[in-house]
Image: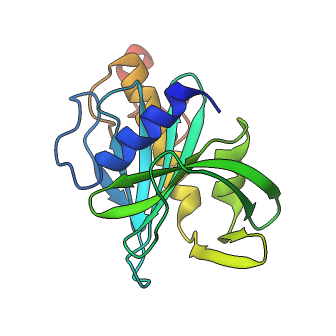
Amino acid sequence: MRVGMIARGIALAAMLGASGAPAAYKSRTVEGWTVAASKDAPGCFVSRTYDHPGDTTLLLGLDADGSNHLSILNANWSIKPDERLKLDFRLSGSAYPKHFAIGLASDGKQGFVTSFGPDFPALFAKSRTLQITRGVTPVERLDLTGGDTAVTELRGCVKAQADGSGSAKAGTSRRDSIPLDPFARGDKRGK
């Protein structure tokens, strides 16, 4: 795992609850997920806090270069910052056994950060749940309902950050080929 990814994951976790985002994208909520721009890297993240004991928080970050990082935090956990872990992750159709993660702490919660291959956000979007275990010990089971819409918006946020186009406009999470006004003539259609 790259050190830079770990630092960005910790920074993402630290942004939990931060209200300001770069001007290129305005934070928004879609289907229960918060989508926001990263303050320290060209990228964005989606987050959700679950009403589980310890208020589990999930953050999925996506950088402009396509790299991703997943952080899970909980106020009841005793993971120490920089502690090295091997955890089993299971999405609805994919498994990542004995996957490396590293401990972190933020806003009174402890947890871990890890990264996956470039296909992870798409697999995350298609999944209904994320189950995490440590050997035979269950760590967390998270409902990913609305994750497909959140990942679509996440990609729109990353695009807005990368091209500096300002806040994502209506239609950013749709196909980019759809003009703003498909009924206008020629150049007046807009993108």
Q: In what quadrant of the picture does the N terminus appear?
A: top right
**Front position in the image: 168 or 139:** 139
Q: x and y percent of residue 28 in the render?
A: 30, 52
* Relative height, residue 132 to residue 152 (above, below): below
Q: Most extreme residue toward the top, as rendered?
A: 187
Looking at the picture, tell me which residue is in the foreground, 104 or 127: 104
Which residue occupies the foreground of this view, 181 or 121? 121
Q: Nearer the viewer, residue 23 or 114?
A: 114
Image check: 101 left or right of 108?
A: right
Using the rendered image of the protein, determine whether residue 186 is visible from the camera's viewpoint.
yes
Colouring scheme applied when the structure was drawn: rainbow
Look at the picture and state if 164 lies above or below 30: above
The spot of residue 175 in percent (x, y) is 56, 38
Residue at the spot 38% in from the left edge and 76% down from the top edge: 55
* One can see residue 182 in this view: no
Residue 53: x and y in percent read: 42, 85
- In this rendering, the answer to whether 139 lies above or below 90 is below
* Residue sitting at the far left: 20
Name the image quarter holding residue 168: top left
Q: Residue at x 66, y 72 (%)?
A: 129
Residue 167 x, y percent position in the rendering: 27, 34
Is 107 situated left or right of 185 in this image?
A: left
- Residue in view at x 41 percent, y 61 percent: 110
Residue at x 52%, y 57% (from the top left corner)? 149
- Specify the quadrant that holds the C terminus: top left
